Image (spheres, coloured by chain):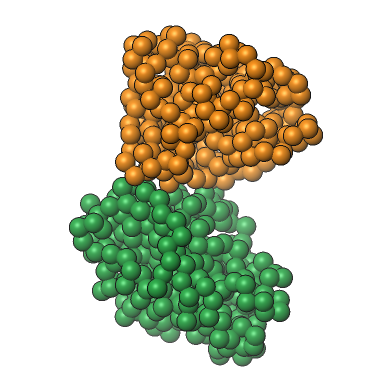
Chain colours: A orange, B green
Amino acid sequence: MIETLERHRCFGGELAFHAHDSSETGTRMRFGSFVPEAAATRPLPVVYCLAGLTCTQETFLIKAGALRVAARLGLILVACDTSPRGLGLPGEDSDWDFGAGAGFYLDATQAPWAGHYRMGSYVDRELPALVERHLPARSDVRGILGHSMGGHGALVLAQRAPERWTSVSAFAPISHPSEVPWGRKAFTNYLGPDPAAWAEWDASVLMRRRAFPRPILVHQGMADQFLAAQLQPQALEAAAAASGQVLELHRCEGYDHSYWFIQSYIEAQLEHHARQLAIAPL
Amino acid sequence: MIETLERHRCFGGELAFHAHDSSETGTRMRFGSFVPEAAATRPLPVVYCLAGLTCTQETFLIKAGALRVAARLGLILVACDTSPRGLGLPGEDSDWDFGAGAGFYLDATQAPWAGHYRMGSYVDRELPALVERHLPARSDVRGILGHSMGGHGALVLAQRAPERWTSVSAFAPISHPSEVPWGRKAFTNYLGPDPAAWAEWDASVLMRRRAFPRPILVHQGMADQFLAAQLQPQALEAAAAASGQVLELHRCEGYDHSYWFIQSYIEAQLEHHARQLAIAPL
């Protein structure tokens, strides 16, 4: 069912990359996993890590400095690609912020993307089912986090299915995609021109409508080059106030949009997940 | 004197990449630095981090997971490129294990490499002088570590000038380059056919001749694909026994040659440097 492409011992556990045929995207998809040593004696909860525009299944695992922390906390990490690839669709590879590398973790309804660009259902259901069948993973709890476009994905997927997602956090998420250039471009092309369809994939709209049952943690760098034009954490904050969502939004002075920022706060985010997932640190 | 190309806040300190005109190589050289927050109140010791074949000044800083540990221990990290680049010398870019990306941290004496491929003197003197002038770095102590070709470099440079290098460690070093294919190819082309010249740049030969005044720490993965053919840690061990060198050689079961291995043991190595450099952890 899954083909393991490479395995490396790491922190006493195993870092691996896998490939499988996805029924959601109709393509061969790749993902990476880190399974800590502690999984030898008991199943561990998984935190799904969603990367941003232009990234792949490798980016977060290589650059976030997360493995040392996950090993200590007893968390499995799973990182997927940011879109299907290689479909040969018109325009698939022409933009860095749309198409391949920019699936936006939603289910496209518009031609030619519908039927393939289904990263929403892929991350929400297909990937966890696969992971829980093939890795020593708990299936009663799940965590999700992401960066930028992946932060949008984590917030949206958790809010759309709070019964399936126990814990959620984000780094510099695209908080209100319906109102910023990256989001409007993606939503128009994947979901069509009607903003009613966009609402179902917009973290701030969903949060205003209904609070997620557990606290949400967000870190945002204040020197982030995309802060004002694309990210708009204040929209998320206003939505949280409206619905009573417990939102811990940390404004991090001097930090930018890079993985140097992510690695500085990944320990805080994984500790949030470990707490929510009710694991005592090892 | 140095041009800073990018800066990112990281762990409360700063990750930066710089460029400068090198008098040793006659080229524009790049290096990266991580300066922890603790440097705001006092100069900190520097650990120079030498990468292996095909790597650049970015590789170690991105992949080794070292910054979290260096921030905690109060160590500045400096990572340089693995060779001069862009000289247009015949054969410079034709092999992955020789020429650009493969400077072997020595001073070439053979045409056309002599006068440019001087990574030995560059790392030993030019780069520390630059770093100690421009960063909040102590100049009374210095540490050096490296991986594979960079492990060879760290061991050789520290042993050649123990008065300048306080602490040394290595991951999977090319321990006895005179006797393995990577080393013989590089030494023949950079230093000429006479093995007497090779001895001055061979860690096992130098160690057999004279013990470094402080303990040396080495980690070697036992599933390393290059272990038997290229690395030969047993040569280092035999040399240490002959000269009375204190050598702590850890054979790490199941680990390969990758940065997944390095990140698993970087904390142990940086703690070794912190002890040798007589810093109390923050």
Q: Tell me: residue B197, above or below residue A71.
A: below
Q: Is residue A256 or residue B135 the one in the foreground? A: A256
Residue A23 rendering spot, x and y as whole percentages: 72, 21
Q: How many marks?
A: 0
Q: Is residue B134 left or right of residue A7?
A: left
* Rendered residue at 56%/72% (across/down): B83
Residue B281 rendering spot, x and y as whole percentages: 24, 54
* Rendered residue at 36%/39% (across/down): A222
Q: Is residue B27 or residue A91 the one in the foreground? A: A91
Q: Is residue B85 left or right of residue A28?
A: left
Residue B125 rendering spot, x and y as whole percentages: 39, 79
Examine the rendering and report whether any part of residue B237 can be seen.
no
Q: Tell me: residue A7, above or below residue B243.
A: above
* Rendered residue at 52%/19% (across/down): A202
Residue B273 rendering spot, x and y as whole percentages: 33, 62
* Rendered residue at 37%/10% (across/down): A243
Q: Locate the C terminus of chain A by quadrant.
A: top left
Q: Quadrant of residue A106?
A: top right
Examine the rendering and report whether any part of residue B60 can be seen.
yes
Q: Is residue A183 left or right of residue B4?
A: right
Q: Is residue B38 or residue B124 the one in the foreground? A: B38
Q: Locate the N terminus of chain A by quadrant.
A: top right
